[in-house]
Amino acid sequence: MSMTLSFTRVTPEELDRAFEDPESAEEFLEDESRPYCFLEKAWAGIGFLLRAAGVDVDLYEDGDPIDDEATRFGWSEQMIAEAADALGATPVEVLVSHYDPAKLSAEEVYPMRHLWDADDLDYLRDHYVDLVRFFQETAAVGGAAIRDFSF
């Protein structure tokens, strides 16, 4: 079983609706026409690099819980804008300069645990670029997002 994390763009009004009726979040997440960012299993590695770079964005913990299980979190348009600024100010080169496979392995960062190596850097780099693009494009239209954690 794997743990994946994704963001789906919604309007601020749709996010309010998801908070009021958590089941409605499912319809937004299932709408394949919506912009989204699927980080697959790269979310924890990216989170490690963000912390190492001193970027104050926590992909897993930030946001407000939508459901009782806390698998879905809402990111308001203000949170999206702030995260877009922070991520945009952190070029991928800066982020990956903190890549240390031995440290990720020692800290058992998901998903590789003790198996991080040099080949995993491209996986994190590619997903980070997608993440930055999603946040910047979502912020540009005044959007909000639903963060979905699947396991």
Image: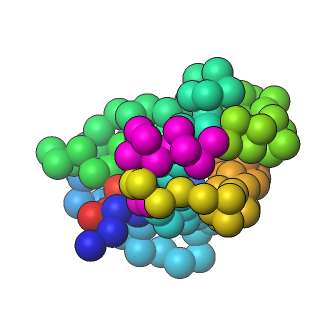
Q: Is residue 104 magenta?
A: yes
User: Is residue 55 depicted above or below 65 in this figure?
Assistant: above
- Point out residue 37 in the picture as x, y percentages from the top left corner: 59, 61
Q: Which residues are magenta?
A: 100-112
Q: Is residue 116 left or right of residue 81?
A: left
- For the N terminus, the image quarter is bottom left
User: Is residue 143 depicted above or below 129 in this figure?
Assistant: above
Instruction: Name the foreground residue: 100 vs 31.
Output: 100
- Point out residue 114 in the picture as x, y percentages from the top left corner: 42, 54
Q: Is residue 2 magenta?
A: no
User: Is residue 45 depicted above or below 35 in this figure?
Assistant: above
Instruction: Name the foreground residue: 105 vs 150.
Output: 105
Q: Is residue 47 left or right of residue 4?
A: right
- Point out residue 38 in the picture as x, y percentages from the top left corner: 54, 65
- Point out residue 125 in the picture as x, y percentages from the top left corner: 72, 56
Q: Residue furthest left?
A: 68
